[in-house]
Amino acid sequence: ESNFLGKVNSERKFNFNFGNAGIVFTNKLTNNDEGPGWKSWSFGFGYNRINNFHNRSFYENKNPSNSLTNYFAENAQGQSYENLDPFYEYLAYYTYLINPDSSNNYSAAVPNGNIVQRRSSETRGAMGETDLTFGGNYSNRLFIGGTIGLSNIRYLEETTFEETDKDNVIDTLNQYEFNQNLTTHGFGFNVKFGVIYKAADWVRLGATIHTPTWYNMHDDYTSSIKAKFDGGYADTKDSPDGSYDYSLTTPFKAIGSLAFIIGKYGLISGDYEFTDISEARLDAEDASFADANDVIRNKYTTMSTLHIGAEYRIGNYSIRGGTAITSSPLNSQYRNGGADYKKTSYGGGIGIRDNDLFIDIGYLYTESNEYFQPYTLSYQDVPGVKNKIRTNNITITFGVKF
């Protein structure tokens, strides 16, 4: 749900995906469960979908103040047309959205706003991780483990930004659309270490450390502008095919957990997750990302997530419920439009299991607020869009022991 200058529009997107699969092999080292010592070790591997990029958004309203053509003109000032950015300003120059004088001072085709702006965007893809996991059981009290994670990213984004002179107040220009396409692929790895300590039969303590994930990234991108003018004239310009290779390092993560076991009837558990988003870094062999990394340091901050859940068992049936609260990753001065990007989730589910197999059905609702500004100008404020994002996730899980 998008609110742009008081006008609310909504969009939705459905997606079906395969969330995870895995197998664990356990080797029992002794038949003596009472004495101290190593009881068993385990080896497992699997795949987990750890992030979902499927989304669709749309907004529209009249901007009374400015236009994207003002942004193109500002960035082009003082440059000859041959030196303009081939993915942005050169396209605007070629389609007459900006026009230079003899001193390469550019004027915008929409100088003073009063034009209807419309933006539609669709994203697809996901982050996934293939894990190789080792674990051990010491005296049925201490459980330790480690994981090597091989991560992959696939992200696709298609956006169309349109401006239309519905009231015929702009000279010559009738309508144009600016199209952008981005495809990102990445591959990386990380290491995780964890421990669970069974302090008593009714209480368990846990801790986990995730190293940063080191990604090699590749972007492919194109853009184009299609413009229509009064009198029927139209023009189109496509950018060249762009590509770029770079690296991304994500922050480390630490998790602490606590669970209370209520006999054979259920449990109450919680965990606290901490990470510092400002520690993320970009790099490349042929360029410096110092400015971008400074923006990351200043704009982002520490982020924490608190999960609390409970389960109640009735024979072979289980009823579960819980909530999760994720704090804002943005420093306070960057929380524009009242949007702080924090997330709140509520979930529930039921499960059926016997000695050898289980089936679970779960539902998770997540809500967050975001703010999007399509462009910026040095001399004037640009209105932004307040987005409310609601996600409904239904999962079905099946497992078997052998």
Image: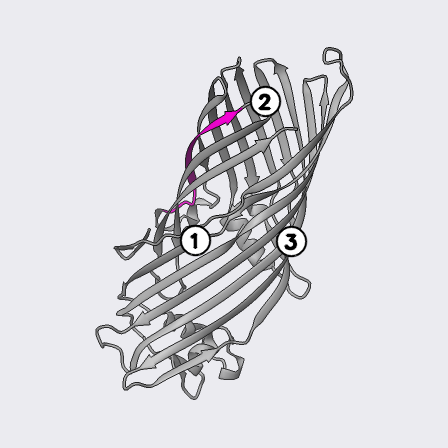
Image-quadrant location for residue 372: bottom left
Q: Residue at x 47, y 79 (%)?
A: 78
Vertical order, 120 against 96 (above or below): above
Answer whether residue 299 is magenta in the image. Answer: no
**Residue 93 visible from this viewpoint:** yes
Residue at 72% in and 17% down: 139
Q: Magenta region: which residues?
A: 339-353
Is 396 on the left-hand or right-hand side of 148?
Answer: left
Place of residue 12 in the rendered image (x, y in percent of width and height, measured from the top left): 37, 52
From the viewer's perspective, is the residue at label 2 or at label 3 nearer? 2
Where in the figure is residue 131, as x and y percent of width and height?
66, 41
**Residue located farthest toward the top when viewing the structure as drawn:** 34
Quadrant position of the C terminus in the picture? top right
Residue 187, label in figure: 3
- Coordinates of residue 166 in the picture (x, y in percent): 24, 72
Between 243 and 396, the one nearer to me in the picture = 396
Of 353 and 71, nearer the camera is 353
**How busy is the neighbourhood of tag 1: few (under 14 within 10 Å), some, or many (20 plus)?**
some
Q: Which residue is labeled 2 in the image? A: 355
Q: Label 1, label 3: how many angstroms apart (C-alpha)?
A: 22 Å
Total count of labels: 3
- 99 on left or right of 148: left
What is the three-letter code of the residue carrying label 1?
Asn
- Residue at (38% x, 56% y) in the render: 57
| Residue 390: quarter of image | top left
Relative to 201, is 343 above or below? below
Real-space Cα separation, disc 2 to disc 3, in angstroms = 39 Å
Which residue position holds label 1?
55
Image color mode: one colour
Foreground: disc 2 or disc 1: 2
Residue 33 in the figure: left or right of residue 318: right
